[in-house]
């Protein structure tokens, strides 16, 4: 049995996937198996992947599925003691996976997850731990105060091996038995915040998440914008609604008030910026925030909403 089962989702993007796979092959010494969920792959790219990386186990996903659903297709086949879930737009320059596995030797027995230090392509820190997500921190996020809160949180920006509260969906190592007991990823979320939902569930079960900053990975596209934000931003907010309100119905009117205020301000800001400098980025973000306002109160699931908006986007509507 392999020590680690590596799971990567790729949306028909070999330009991202190949450097990720190459870096895993070069820098991982422990035993592992690698699953690539080939999401909406063309026949040509699927055949190229099979030819160029015969050691990869390919899981075809030929219909619209979100981050949770696609990962779960592979996770249910995992044989390793640990699962290493990682985005395809990442690469490592040292034995990141080996270091994360070794970390468990120094952690308390109830540690379920260890995440690496995540860097931007320019070497700056993108993610070093995550604080607790609750109604209070959601309010701070709307007020643009959450980054200040993060700087003083004991769960973030420490050095070495330390306790955090939440894992980061871009890259983490988790004990397979724990992941399975949690029911894998919650498929109610299309993407965002399934990683937060998972680690919140882990903490409530009396287990912990850690970070080891000696394990480093680069996430090349974190924080970038694209036209697909017109679909992803409203879908992510639908996920937030599930996370913050499904078990706390009392918070729903507060949540709606915060969302509408925040999104109205963001919509107006990006509309003004677009009129001033005519940059496409601001036009896309204006339409994305406006889509949140139009859809947050309807009865669509995150998956239904994404499919509708993404299909409209592809047809130029």
Image (cartoon, grey):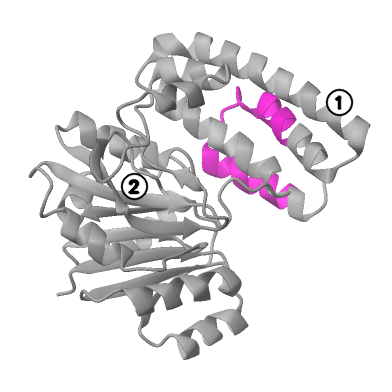
> What label sits on residue 185 in the rendered view?
2
Category of crowding for the residue at label 2, using alpha-carbon neighbours closer than 10 angstroms: few (below 14), some (14–19), many (at least 20): many
At horizontal 92% and vertical 31% (from top left) the residue drawn is: 275
Camera sees residue 78: no
Residue corresponding to mark 1: 272
At horizontal 41% and vertical 17% (from top left) the residue drawn is: 135
- The segment highlighted magenta reads 288-312
> In the picture provided, is 252 more to the left or to the right than 109?
right
State which quadrant residue 103 falls in.
bottom left
As for residue 289 lying within the magenta part, the answer is: yes
> What label sits on residue 191 in the rendered view?
none
Q: Position of residue 220 (x, y in %)?
A: 55, 58
At horizontal 21% and vertical 76% (from top left) the residue drawn is: 31
* Disc with the residue nearer the chain's start (2 vs 1): 2
> Would you say the magenta stretch is mainly helix, strand or loop?
helix
Residue at the left extreme, as displayed: 109
Residues 26 and 234: in front is: 26
Camera sees residue 262: yes
């Amino acid at each position: 049995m392999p020590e680690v089962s590596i799971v990567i989702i790729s949306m028909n993007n070999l330009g991202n996937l190949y450097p990720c796979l190459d870096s895993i092959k070069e820098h991982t010494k422990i035993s592992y198996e690698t699953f690539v969920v080939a999401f909406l792959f063309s026949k040509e790219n699927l055949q190229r992947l099979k030819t160029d990386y015969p050691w990869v186990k390919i899981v075809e996903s030929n219909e619209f599925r979100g981050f949770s659903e696609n990962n779960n297709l592979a996770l249910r086949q995992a044989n390793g003691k640990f699962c290493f879930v990682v985005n395809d737009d990442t690469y490592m320059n040292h034995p990141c996976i080996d270091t994360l596995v070794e970390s468990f030797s120094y952690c308390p027995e109830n540690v379920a997850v260890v995440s690496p230090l995540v860097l931007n392509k320019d070497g700056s820190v993108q993610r070093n731990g995550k604080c607790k997500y609750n109604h209070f921190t959601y309010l701070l996020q709307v007020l643009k105060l959450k980054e200040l809160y993060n700087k003083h949180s004991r769960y973030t920006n420490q050095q070495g091996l330390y306790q955090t509260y939440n894992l980061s969906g871009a890259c983490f190592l988790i004990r397979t038995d724990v992941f399975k007991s949690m029911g894998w990823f919650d498929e109610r979320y299309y993407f965002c915040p399934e990683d937060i939902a998972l680690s919140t569930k882990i903490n409530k079960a009396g287990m912990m998440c850690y970070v080891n900053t000696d394990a480093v990975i680069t996430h090349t596209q974190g924080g970038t914008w694209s036209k697909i934000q017109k679909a992803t931003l409203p879908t992510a907010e639908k996920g937030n609604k599930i996370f913050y309100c499904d078990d706390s119905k009392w918070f729903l009117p507060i949540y709606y008030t915060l969302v509408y205020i925040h999104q109205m301000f963001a919509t107006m800001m990006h509309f003004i910026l677009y009129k001033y400098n005519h940059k496409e980025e601001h036009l896309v973000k204006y339409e994305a925030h406006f889509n949140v306002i139009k859809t947050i109160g309807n009865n669509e699931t995150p998956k239904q909403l994404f499919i509708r908006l993404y299909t409209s986007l592809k047809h130029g509507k």
